[in-house]
Amino acid sequence: MTRVITVASGKGGVGKTTITANLGVALATYGEEVIVLDADVAMANLELILGMEGKSVTLHDVLSGDADVEDAIYEGPGGVKVVPAGISLEGLRKIKMDRLESALEILIESADILLIDAPAGLEKDALAAIAAAQEMILVTTPEVPSISDALKTKIIANRLGVDILGVVINREQHDKTFLTISEIETILEVPVIAVIPEDNEVSRAAAFGEPLVVKNPKSPTSNAIMQLGADLIGEE
Ligand code: ADP
Ligand code: MG
């Protein structure tokens, strides 16, 4: 059965899109059929990080009722399949989030794992992305505001019956002002499943449109994401 996993956070700018893109590539390199879907329809970034902007058919067209989702699937780095959201403001005008569900049904048929990059916040678009999945990865930085927003997202996900696989702490730095892993686990009551270091190469890779796990495969950041992928599918 296809696993549908949403990468969500609550707070914006904590690394959801970075993690979705790189985790998708990681899982594809382990031989999984993976589709990454950019459900952040207003602030789409996934296609930029993967160097795949400018595609003719995007999720905007699908959610506007102007295209079939099959035509919005593109081959990305490492063999990951990508459904870009579309980055134009114009494309947002006609979209209806309730068209997402039927699009997902089709995507599920063509993948082992469907990874959804969720929008920040808890508005309609974020709730649609959360409710679409059976499983969730919660992303937070080790800072209090980010953890507070992750907690709200966790509570909503629990109400919707979504299974929270764990927390990924992103942008970890050796800084005493930040919360520790065990403090974060205590607050969120969810296990930490990966710790991803602060790494200047993340934004450099994004600027090149090349995922970090491809550009710098041996870096500690890439290792942490590859390991997260391996853990998710039970690889050694
Ligand atoms: P979100 O999707 O949650 O809004 P992004 O993945 O777009 O977050 O990341 C937000 C910003 O943080 C980007 O500029 C990205 O390059 C940077 N970033 C993400 N993860 C890291 C990291 N581990 N180290 C350094 N910068 C990071
Ligand atoms: Mg994002």
Image: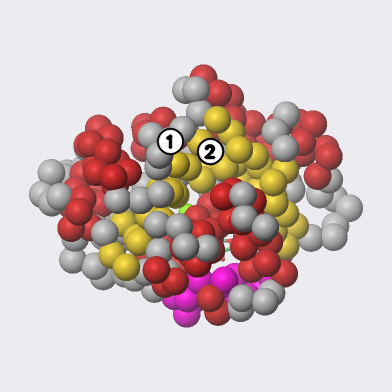
Residue sitting at x 28%, y 65%: 74
Q: Nearer the viewer, residue 135 or 67?
A: 135
Where residue 200 appears, x then y in whole percent?
66, 73
Element marked by disc 1: loop
From what the image shows, is residue 139 above or below residue 215? above
Q: Which residue is mark 2?
A: 136
- Disc 2 within 8 angstroms of ligand 1 (CB): no
Q: Which residue is mark 1?
A: 133
Where residue 44 appears, x then y in whole percent?
37, 56
User: Considering the image in quadrants, where does the C terminus appear?
Assistant: bottom right
Question: Residue 171 occupies which quadrant of the picture?
Answer: bottom right
- Read off the magenta span: 198-213
Displayed-image quarter of ligand 1: bottom right
Mark 1–mark 2 CB contact (< 8 Å): yes
Q: Residue furthest left?
A: 66
As for residue 166 lying within the magenta part, the answer is no
Q: Residue furthest right?
A: 176
From what the image shows, is residue 199 above or below residue 141? below
Residue sitting at x 52%, y 42%: 8
